Amino acid sequence: MAAYDYKALTADGQRTSGVISADTPRAARRELRARQLTPVEVQEAGQAKPGVRRLRARLSHKERTLFTRQLAVLLQSGMTVEEALTAAAADGNPKSVKSLVLGVRAQVLEGVSLADALRSAPAAFPPLYRSVVAAGEAAGRLPAVLEQLATNLERTYRMTATARAALVYPAVLGVMALLMVSALMVFVVPKLVEQFAMLGTTELPLLTRLVIGASDLVRNSGWLIALSVAGAVFLFTQALRNPAFRKSLDRFLLELPLIGPLIRTLSASQFARVHATLAGSGATVIEALSAARGAMGNTVFRDAATSIIEKVQQGGALSAAMKTTRVFPPLLTHMVQSGEAARDVPAMMNRAADFLESEFEATTRTMLSLLEPLIIVVLGGIVGTIVLSIMLPIMQLNTLALG
């Protein structure tokens, strides 16, 4: 029987530590639970903390969502973390997911906390995910926190799947339009030019000459245009790595008429959801704000979150700090202020996030429904212009023949 140093949480959420005798780390964790303690870290006395082995597996958003839901359900049924991971690995998951879960389980059995074990697979579990799990473990509310995390992941997955499904038809329509116009420019227009030359037509209408010029440009310099577009895309992606350029671009996007409000709504909902999840799981206000800042994709909102953290650390109110940034929707700041008055900021943050996400979904759905007829109108206009440029010389010839 060996001695193990442990860190655990009491029934009322207080941290405690000490030494316990057991045959294995697993037996030590079982003994701690028998004493009404929630083990956070268990390692053999006199040894360094177990190292975290890197796992190179990846999880798609769908796989991560399903795994989180499985783990939450299993833990809420009364299973230990080790037992829940074992059951999740055997629950008909793909081989790659099963291998990853078993790798995490092996490290948990060695005394590593679940959050530290998840850190071994950074490609599968992003920093925000691990932060939420760590906060749940520290507060002794891991099952409830995983339940909320799974709900948030499902909501995000549903929003993403809806947007992708709605974009399929416009994307296919756009590709077909591009192929059709390219075929007209490369194959049809040159043949008609030959026919006009055979008929002796010398002075073609301006529209016809413009279409023929565009056709010659596509046929003779198409490869150069493609290379230019590819080069521009490459330079743009490289420029995004420049913080100053990225900040200017994000600020410009927020000022656009239709895209700006969408980005603002989505960023605000992400901030509110992440903060509410972590604050509700027992994390401190600064920890919740730091995690919310890490979830921001827009640098303007990330800078705003940094400013909020500084003001809160100086003793300022969260709602007042959010107002001074002037980037968050008034609805969110008002609800946070109400939450501070009621001493329940996480609940009000969740309500605000629900409303903002609903608004984002409704606006996105409306914009995508308008995108389809817009593509059809643009395609019809381009094809109609080409047809008209062809018909004008024919009508001109008919007029000359009749005259």
Image (cartoon, grey):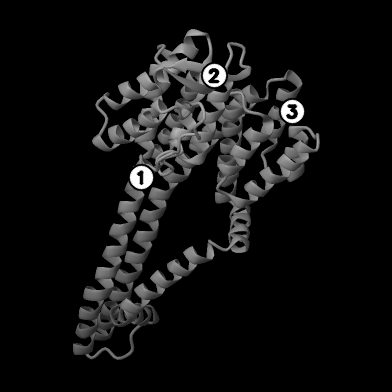
Q: As rendered, which of 122 and 225 lies closer to the eye?
A: 122
Q: Position of residue 337 (x, y in %)?
A: 74, 28
Residue 19, numbered label: 2
Residue beneath disc 3: 337
* Secondary structure under the numbered disc 3 in the rendered image: helix
In the displayed structure, does residue 226 sit left or right of residue 279?
left
Q: Name the mark nearer the viewer: 1 or 2.
A: 2
Residue 270, numbered label: none
Q: As rendered, which of 357 and 155 lies closer to the eye?
A: 155
Q: Position of residue 40 (x, y in %)?
A: 52, 23
Q: Amino acid at mark 2?
A: Val
The residue that appears at 60% across and 44% down in the rendered structure is 264
Q: Amino acid at mark 1?
A: Arg
Residue 359 higher or lower than 347, as above or below: below
Residue 330 higher or lower than 33, as above or below: below
Q: As rendered, which of 245 and 195 lies closer to the eye?
A: 245
On-image quarter of the C terminus: bottom left
Q: Earlier in the sequence, mark 3 or mark 2?
A: 2
The quadrant holding residue 244 is: bottom right
Contact check, label 1 and label 3, Cβ < 8 Å: no
Residue beneath disc 1: 56
Q: Earlier in the sequence, mark 1 or mark 2?
A: 2
In the displayed structure, does residue 174 sit left or right of residue 301?
left
Q: Residues within 10 Å of mark 2 (few under 14, many from 20)?
A: some
